[in-house]
């Protein structure tokens, strides 16, 4: 069955912007009217005939640009407001036309500026068509943590089906629609699915105000209409929990982008008195499975999704999507569930032994006084016999020597770094990911010992 642009009642609230006690609302009808207005602009031949570069930061405007592009049959590049090298990205997609908020269009980039939505005067209901399931509607860009960002094509049917599946998995019901407070940028695949696409196809509205700082998150949750759901990352969960940030009551928290430490998940549940949930997915395939971290390490695929193991590689199959080979290795557990073993590129081999960089990082971060840390492999690890892994730590009260001494009792000697590089902070991006090249640059610069 084909999904319409918006599978919600005309009066359903899709987005909430700051203002009033619970924010100004954008209903499905208001949103669709704006979609048709912007689609008419995008249909003008003077606006190019290539993809639409979505540079909006506001979630509602980001969604507006996506859906208007769908209506015009132009794929939307999920670039975001902080995408570096927009001019290079425009050259990468011939005939591209950018859409940005008022005053935010980069100099020299052809595009259209749009404003916040306001309710229209009464009139006939706007059309709400169902695009073909195989219509290419978006290009999701990888984080670029391992090189130049890759563009992954997204068909409409897969995106809509996954939104409906997520709504079913997390118990979203039209009688009591949830308010999604997302701290993840809308251009990231996780943020795109949970804060942009989900309100279009499941019983939820998305908060469009600031959520970067703890005070912003607290204010957003206070303004949210219950039940509120916090959509965030392990890095942000740790900052909120360990910082003792008081938060208003909310129904649940969802984390993704990296596996959540079970001890941290348990601390979050105690602090916030709600279930701490996780989503497993990948940019190339989108969200695929979920779990409650404190209950089990097993992942349960979404309805209509299967994740299997083939030749040591995880393969995802879902409605509207060709089979996708993932970058992870898994262990099937029966009845469709699976255990995540780690990323294939995360495994390193030295002296005939194998280890996971993520596993070594967990050991490092478990040492007393280590606030953050990471292991990394140099480029010549497998070519140079004397090469060793690199270890970085944010540990203000510890010396590099004491950290290394403690690691000796916990890590196989072949994977022990020659030294631990102490730094004030790790070069994480807004999602908490560590670009490998940035880590290697720290070592090359001779970081503080």
Image: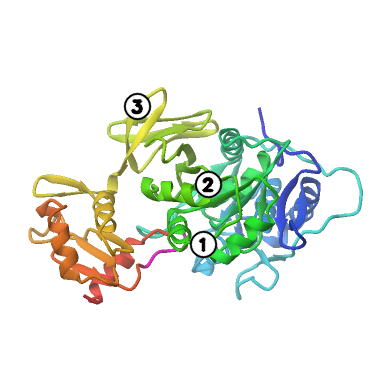
- Residue annotated with mark 1: 245
3D distance between C-alphas at marks 1 and 2: 14 Å
Is residue 96 visible in the rendered image? The answer is: no
Question: Quadrant of the rendered structure where residue 58 is?
Answer: bottom right
Tag nearer the camera, 1 or 3: 1
Residue at screen point 20% across, 47% down: 355
C-alpha separation, residue under disc 2 versus residue under disc 3: 30 Å
Tell me the residue that label 2 is attached to.
273
- Circle 1: element type: loop
With 439 as the anchor, is 148 left or right in this view?
A: right
Query: Which x, y percent locates residue 400?
Result: 19, 70
Residue under the point 64% across and 68% down: 110
Q: What element carries label 3?
A: strand
Work out whether residue 376 can be spotted: yes
Residue 333 got which mark? 3
Q: Where is residue 352 in the image (x, y as percent from the top left)?
A: 9, 45
Query: Circle 2 sits in a helix, a strand or a loop, which is it?
Result: loop
Q: Is residue 430 above or below residue 339?
A: below
| Magenta stretch bounds | 427-431
């Amino acid at each position: 069955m084909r999904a319409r642009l918006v599978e919600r009642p005309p009066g359903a609230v899709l987005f909430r912007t700051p203002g009033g006690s619970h924010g100004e609302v954008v209903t499905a009808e208001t949103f669709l009217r704006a979609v048709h207005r912007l689609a008419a602009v995008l249909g003008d031949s003077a606006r190019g005939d290539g993809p639409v570069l979505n540079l909006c930061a506001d979630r509602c405007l980001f969604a507006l640009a996506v859906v208007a592009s769908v209506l015009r049959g132009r794929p939307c590049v999920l670039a975001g407001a902080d995408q570096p090298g927009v001019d290079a990205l425009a050259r990468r997609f011939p005939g591209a036309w950018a859409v940005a908020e008022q005053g935010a269009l980069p100099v020299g980039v052809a595009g259209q500026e749009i404003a916040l939505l306001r309710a229209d005067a009464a009139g006939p209901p706007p059309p709400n068509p169902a695009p073909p399931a195989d219509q290419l509607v978006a290009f999701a860009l990888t984080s670029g943590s391992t090189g130049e960002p890759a563009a992954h094509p997204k068909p409409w049917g897969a995106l809509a089906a996954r939104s409906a599946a997520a709504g079913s998995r997390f118990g979203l019901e039209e009688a009591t629609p949830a308010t999604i407070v997302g701290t993840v940028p809308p251009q990231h695949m996780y943020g795109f699915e949970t804060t942009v696409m989900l309100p279009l196809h499941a019983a939820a509205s998305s908060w469009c105000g600031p959520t970067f700082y703890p005070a912003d998150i607290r204010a957003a949750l206070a303004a949210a209409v219950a039940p509120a759901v916090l959509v965030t990352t392990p890095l942000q969960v740790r900052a909120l929990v360990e910082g003792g940030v008081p938060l208003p009551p909310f129904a649940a928290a969802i984390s993704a982008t990296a596996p959540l430490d079970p001890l941290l998940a348990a601390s979050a549940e105690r602090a916030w008195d709600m279930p701490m949930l996780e989503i497993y997915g990948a940019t190339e395939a989108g969200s695929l499975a979920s779990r409650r971290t404190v209950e089990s390490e097993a992942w349960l695929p979404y309805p209509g999704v299967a994740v299997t193991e083939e030749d040591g590689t995880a393969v995802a199959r879902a409605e509207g999507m060709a089979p996708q080979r993932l970058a992870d290795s898994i262990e099937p557990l029966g009845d469709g569930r699976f255990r995540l073993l780690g990323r294939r590129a995360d495994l390193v081999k030295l002296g005939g032994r194998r280890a996971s960089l993520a596993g070594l990082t967990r050991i490092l971060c478990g040492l007393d006084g280590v606030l953050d840390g990471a292991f990394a492999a140099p480029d010549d690890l497998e070519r140079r016999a004397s090469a060793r892994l690199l270890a970085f730590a944010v540990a203000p009260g510890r010396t590099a020597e004491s950290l290394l001494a403690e690691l000796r009792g916990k890590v196989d000697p072949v994977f022990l770094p020659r030294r631990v590089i102490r730094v004030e902070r790790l070069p994480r991006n807004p999602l908490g990911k560590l670009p490998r090249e940035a880590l290697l640059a720290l070592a090359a610069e001779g970081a503080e010992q």
